[in-house]
Image (cartoon, rainbow, N blue to C red):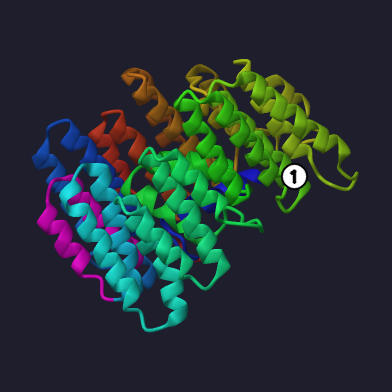
Amino acid sequence: MFIRVIGLLSAALLAGACSLPVETFRAAAYSEIARVQMAARDPAGARDTAQRAVAAIADTETEDERLFGIPTAAIAQLRAGDMDGAQNTIESVDKDQNRVFAYAALAVALKDSGFPAQVRGAASRALEAATSAESAYDRDEIMVYAAWAQAVTGDPRGALRHAEGLNRQRNRVGLLALIAEAQLEAGDIAGALATVESIGEGVEHSDNDGWVFSRIVRGIAVDPIAVFDNLLLESRTPLQAVAMTRIAMAQARAVDGSSAGQSFLTAVQFAEMASSPSSRILSIGTIALARARSGDISGAIESLDHAGRLADQAEEEDDLDEARIFLQIVRNAIDGRTMISELMEQSAEISSWSESLVIGAIVHNKLGNPRQAGEYLAAAAEHLSGDDKLSILAAAYASLAGLRTDRGDRAGARAAARQSLAIAERVSEGSEDRVIGLFFASVALARSGDIPRALEAAERMQKPVSK
């Protein structure tokens, strides 16, 4: 089910492992709270919260907990203005592989937090650790993150040279997609296009290790809610299609409609190379959503029509109900409408119709329609059950709270954040999904300005009970 894919990827956002490192989630929640406190000119509160993050990871037991927990706590200190403390925390990493990940995360966070003088130093430390790895296989794996940090911090040419030296095609493609993303963020659309074109033939999907782990870094270092939204919509899309779609959106923002249209068409061509009919249709539907977000409504409808024709041409044994529903959700969202009653009427044929309500909410969030997103989520809150579905519903409410915050609707943001917490509290005690739900609720509460409830939600995360 689509919603289960989202659930697994959301866990991977900060866990990336079979066992959920709860203290990393707690530290990440504290990190977000500290950021809000600093923005609200409460440096003392921010430093206290950052120290809670450091304390949370002090007694980590597993390798996974240290891999993600240490950079998360360091970033909390960074956001609270404690640069020396952040550096000391990072220095406690004792393995080259973990050191690469930690310094890459720190470099991204330094750039996001406005510390340009220190950014390149962190990227250099990541490269040093990657180069010193004894195993050639390990070097090939971890160089992806070191070279990505290099690109993020202003040296895409150096990162491209490292990409050329990678032995595994999967690692090379993942790194090239990350370099293109960094080039776009720096405003170099032509460079990003050339980088994607250098990938060559062969399709790599967005479950690429380098890409997924970079999303984990972004969740820790920049914005976990935005990463959740993107994982939702990119989970089955070929990586080249993801990259070309982002290039097209950048071209549209630069008011280069002709180039944007061509890049969207190229993205569709890559999407058509996805591994299954359902994935192909879902990928093209996601591209249509991106076209609509870029203001190209006619192009979005054209892409939806194309995806619909592919669905009509598919073999009878292909299960495309989910894909068809997604296309209809996007089409209606472009028109500013919900389709809640239609979804419920199809309950006899679509066993997962209620899960699509959450998808509809995220689609409307992407299009900037908070009222319609709220309608979907309210219906989902009434009908959804199951821990995994409820945790994702809590995350979706957090996403809505973020949209309302960005629009200056503090009361609406706070209401959505509190609803996120209420949904998380419906998840079974002692489950991994409760941790995920409480994490997103804590972030949403912090961003809406409710620091006391945000801290309380973070403190209530408990280690899942082994089954």
Across and down, in percent, residue 291 comes to 59, 28
Q: Residue furthest bottom?
A: 134
Residue 66 or residue 267, whichever sits in front: 267
Q: Can I make out residue 164 in this image? A: yes
Q: Position of residue 153 (x, y in %)?
A: 29, 51
The location of residue 317, given as percent across then percent down, is 88, 48
**For residue 99, above or below residue 411:** below
- Indicate left or right for 61 with 200 as reference: left
Q: Which residue is found at the position 35% from the left and 79% from the top? A: 133
Q: On the image, which quarter does residue 113 sit in?
A: top left
Q: Which residue is at the front of the view, 354 or 83?
A: 83
The answer to whether any part of residue 144 appears in the image is no
Q: What count of labels does the image hold?
A: 1
For residue 65: magenta? Answer: no
- Residue found 51% across the figure and 38% down from its top: 247
Please tell me whether residue 142 is drawn above or below residue 368 in the rendered image: below
Type of residue at label 1?
Answer: Ser
Q: Residue under circle 1?
A: 278
x, y percentage for residue 172?
51, 63
Residue range (magenta): 66-94
Instruction: Using the image, determine if residue 139 lies above or below residue 146.
Output: below
Which residue: 78% across, 46% down? Answer: 277
